[in-house]
Image (tube, rainbow, N blue to C red):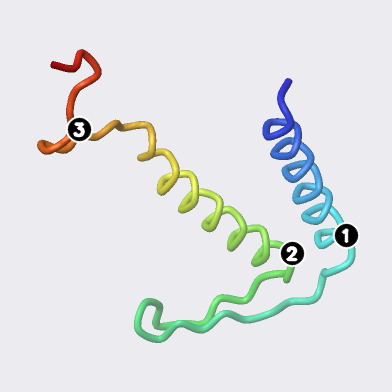
Amino acid sequence: MNAKLLFRILLLIIMLLLLVLIGVYNKETVSLSLPPLMPKAIRQPAAIMYFAFFAAGLLTGALLIGAGGVKSAPAAGKASKGGK
């Protein structure tokens, strides 16, 4: 296991622990108001709101990083590996 993978796993564990702690200690109800998108305000426990925003950010990041697996064509001006 390389250091980069170990770091990612530790970071994920820390973030999940943070989600658990937020869920345990933040039970007050909060409201979210986005007039251009939703006509009524949403009232949920703070922990649920935090989890929803975390999930949205995680999915957005995964979609942005997931596109990195596609390799682009080499530039026209550069020589190929076969070389002439």
Residue beneath disc 1: 24
Which quadrant of the structure image shows residue 67?
A: top left
Q: How many marks?
A: 3
Up-down relation of residue 27 to residue 3 (above or below) = below
Residue beneath disc 2: 47
Label 2: element kind: helix
Give the CA separation, mark 3 to mark 1. Answer: 51 Å
Looking at the image, which is closer to me, 29 or 75?
Answer: 75
View extreme (top): residue = 82
Q: Which of pointers 2 and 3 indicates the residue nearer the eye?
A: 3
Looking at the image, which is closer to me, 51 or 68?
Answer: 68
| Quadrant (top left, top right, bottom left, bottom right) of the N terminus | top right
Residue 63 locus on image (x, y percent): 41, 45
Label 3: element kind: loop
Of the image marks 2 and 1, the number of the one nearer the N terminus: 1
Up-down relation of residue 79 to residue 8 (above or below) = above
Amino acid type, label 2: Ala
Give me the residue at 35% from left, 83% from top: 36
View extreme (left): residue = 76
Q: Residues within 10 Å of mark 1 (few under 14, many from 20)?
A: few
Residue beneath disc 3: 74
Give me the residue at 81% from left, 56% from top: 18
Amino acid type, label 1: Val
Residue 42 image label: none
Of the image marks 3 and 1, the number of the one nearer the N terminus: 1
Residue 69 locus on image (x, y percent): 37, 32
